[in-house]
Image (spheres, grey):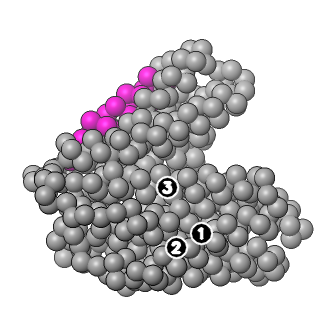
Amino acid sequence: MSLFTHRAYWRWSAGVQLARLPGTMAPLAFTLLTTATTGSYRLGGLLMSVYVAAEMVCAVPVGRLLDRVGPARGLPALLLLTAAGFAALAAAAHAPAPVLVALVLLPGISAGALSGGFRTLLADTVDDALLPRAISVDSMLLEGVLIGGPALVALLDLAGTVVPLAAMAVACVAAAVLVPRRPGSGDRVESAADVPPAGLGTYLPWLCCAFTVGLLLSTIEVAPLPLVQRLGAPETAAPVVIAVLCAASIAGSALYAWRGKTGDPRLFLAGFVAGGLVLAADLGWAGLLASVAVIGACTGPLVAATSVNLQRLLPKNRRSAGFSLSFIVQAGGFGLGSLAVGVLPLWVAPLFGVFAAAIAGAMLVRKPARAIGTVSVTS
């Protein structure tokens, strides 16, 4: 079956994009809300920090709970809890700051494992042959969500400060309706005897790949302004860097989807190393755009290869927790990369991503048979 005529996949895709949308809307929505109610954006930043912290702390425990009850049953409940949290926050928009901070914990706690749960359901929605292409198409659609979320907040804010929060709640409810519910496909929990023994070292190379993606991408996404100012260009040139990154990422994912094969992640890690070194070297506009394009083109394929190989290694009754951990590791890399941009010389920041990519590649060279192209443990 072709992916483009795969109705179950497109239902899954619509659900996961709607589930992701509130997360991309939250930073601007929280800022606009608190600016309108308190006159300061600082409380909005605090709300976002608490929301992200709750996601990161609770992602794996909640993902483990999803593994126990089955993501097809657990995801709708989590999405409805997340919707209730956003609705409560909208209803209490004028409440004191401590109340808002407490309320934002609810959607943060319940939303942390959504990505891992949906990724687990994808394994039951498409077969192994279509999986690399499915993940690549999803990466392309994610770029649209990342861009469209803030734009939607700006548009909805014209109708009222709490309208974006209400829309975030509605998106979660719609995602809950779209969660695939195939009997017996996503809810079977294997016994402990079915779980193959696997140590942390088996998963570590792929977690390192996820960390590298967040670490190096943040160097570009957080620092487009200083990158162009380093070349003597005006502030208005900063969006060019992000545009090249997004275009290259979409093109790389499209090519990967067209090939429909897992590919060797060491090739994409090598692209990260080369792109990061050129970015650090400050080789003018040509060097900047070329490095950003190479990193962007390798991002989607590396994410897809990492995801496919993690699925091959994770036992079925650990997938939601395992994928949730990989998303948190990637977010942690993004946070550390952002910190590096803020406190270190600009030319030093990309070198951390280069180092992480080299380490991940070395891990895969040491044990390629176990890491690349292994047979699925659940086949």
Taking the spot 33% from the left edge, 50% from the top edge, the residue there is: 321
Residues tagged 3 and 2 counted as in contact (Cβ below 8 A): no
Q: In the displayed orientation, state which residue is furthest to the right.
A: 232
Question: Dot 1: few (<14), some (14–19), or many (≥20) neighbours within 10 Å?
Answer: many
> Magenta stretch?
71-90
Residues tagged 1 and 2 counted as in contact (Cβ below 8 A): yes
> Mark 2: which amino acid?
Ala
- Residue 122 at x, y percent in the picture: 27, 61
Q: Relative to the observer, which residue lies in front, 108 or 32? A: 108
Cα distance, mark 1 to mark 2?
6 Å
Residue on which the image places disc 3: 329
> Mark 1: which amino acid?
Ala
Q: Relative to the observer, which residue lies in front, 362 or 278? A: 362
Q: Would residue 74 be counted in the magenta stretch?
A: yes
SS type, badge 1: helix
**In the image, is residue 283 above or below residue 170?**
below
Dominant secondary-structure state across the stretch colored magenta: helix
Cα distance, mark 3 to mark 1?
13 Å
Residue on which the image places disc 1: 356
- Residue 325 at x, y percent in the picture: 41, 53
